[in-house]
């Protein structure tokens, strides 16, 4: 346990006391809560006094990992509790934050997707074409896009990405996130800890940001976490509602290596329609820029055959739902001597 962790625990506790004083109603109940918070604070100070010399004299990497995982679970629980107690934050005043807030508002209007049942609920397989072998996993967002749910989904994704057994099922885990959540200390702390962790990770984590309509990648608050990108550990992607003519080189310069595109442009209107030469050229430029394209929401064999006429390597959707078990349950852990 490092001194910075002890400081973060104490700071978080003080913030909890302030929030409780603001949120809890007046009366006897509030006095009881204050008494409990004060008692907990004294306990935290006592633990800090005991653990501080040990942390400075004999640090343990395994103990660090256990304490870090426990702290992340506690932070996720507090995030969900605060999300229920506190009112929504007021809209930002500056232009850049207003643009990001508009993006977030558009994200919240997205309809919920059907989820497969079972132990892999919420996960969709991403298959490699044309063999249709499940090789990656996709964790989309639901209808409600509150801060607590965003942080909870990020914590779950990081936990899966750290699992060495999960690497036997998926080489990368793509997770849809509201870009505004990356401005919170909880999200940045989780991502920084994942990137800076020197232990082997199960797979690459890929936060994916949704773009709607005529929006361009520069509308996103890219400076929040792009400096944390690390090859083979953390990359970034875009989910497009419209497969617009974005410049592949520009996307790569901005730090995006993944693109999730709709199936519509790949589906011919009739049997007499041939391949779309503009779409072929666009896909070729993306491939030259080393941006991997994933066609989403494929629901039938006919749609898959249409997509296979184009140079596309990956796809996801209800058609591949039976493969969700292949990426849902991590393989049994093996003991390392």
Image: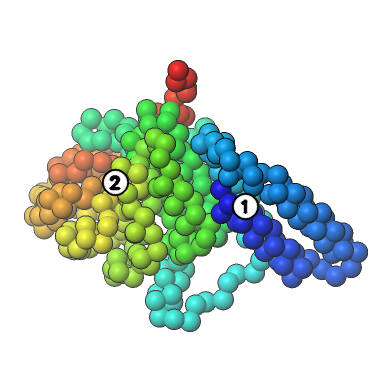
Q: Is residue 154 visible?
A: no
Residue 285 pos. (x, y %): 12, 54
Residue that appears at 42% across and 71% down: 100
Quadrant assignment, res 246: bottom left
Residue 157 pos. (x, y %): 46, 44
Residue that appears at 44% across and 38% down: 162
Residue at far top of view? 337
Residue that appears at 64% across and 69% down: 87
Q: Is 28 on the left or on the right of 116, as rendered?
A: right
Relative to 238, say whether 301 is above or below: above
Q: Which residue is mark 1?
A: 6
Q: Which residue is mark 2?
A: 231
Asked if marks 2 and 1 touch (Cβ < 8 Å), the reply is: no
Q: Is 253 on the left or on the right of 146, as rendered?
A: left
Q: Label 2 crowding class (10 Å Cα cut-off): few <14, some 14-19, many 20+?
A: few
Q: Earlier in the sequence, mark 2 or mark 1?
A: 1
Q: CA distance from mark 2 to mark 1?
A: 31 Å
């Amino acid at each position: 346990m490092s001194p910075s962790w002890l400081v973060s625990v104490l700071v978080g506790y003080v913030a909890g006391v302030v929030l409780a004083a603001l949120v809890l109603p007046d009366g006897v109940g509030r006095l009881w809560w204050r008494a409990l918070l004060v008692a907990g604070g004294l306990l935290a100070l006592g633990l800090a006094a005991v653990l501080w010399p040990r942390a400075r004299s004999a640090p343990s990497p395994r103990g660090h990992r256990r304490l870090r995982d426990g702290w992340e679970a506690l932070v996720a629980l507090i995030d969900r509790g605060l999300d229920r107690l506190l009112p929504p934050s007021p809209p930002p005043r500056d232009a850049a934050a207003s643009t990001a807030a508009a993006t977030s508002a558009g994200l919240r209007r997205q309809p919920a997707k059907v989820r497969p049942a079972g132990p892999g609920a919420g996960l969709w397989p991403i298959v490699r074409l044309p063999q249709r072998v499940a090789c990656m996993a996709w964790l989309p967002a639901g209808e409600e896009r509150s801060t607590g749910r965003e942080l909870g989904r990020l914590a779950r994704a990081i936990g899966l990405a750290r699992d060495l057994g999960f690497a036997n099922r998926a080489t990368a885990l793509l997770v849809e996130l509201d870009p505004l959540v990356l401005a919170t200390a909880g999200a940045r702390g989780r991502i920084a800890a994942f990137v800076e962790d020197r232990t082997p990770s199960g797979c690459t984590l890929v936060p994916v940001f949704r773009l709607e309509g005529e929006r361009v990648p520069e509308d996103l608050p890219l400076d929040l976490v792009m400096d944390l990108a690390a090859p083979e550990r953390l990359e970034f992607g875009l989910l497009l509602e419209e497969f617009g003519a974005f410049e592949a080189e520009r996307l790569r310069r901005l730090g995006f290596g993944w693109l999730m595109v709709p199936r519509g442009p790949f589906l011919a209107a009739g049997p007499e329609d041939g391949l779309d030469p503009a779409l072929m050229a666009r896909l070729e430029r993306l491939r030259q820029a080393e941006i991997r394209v994933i066609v989403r929401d494929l629901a039938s064999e006919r749609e898959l055959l249409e997509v296979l006429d184009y140079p596309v390597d990956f796809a996801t959707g209800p058609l591949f739902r039976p493969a969700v078990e292949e990426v849902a349950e991590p393989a049994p852990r093996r003991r390392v001597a």
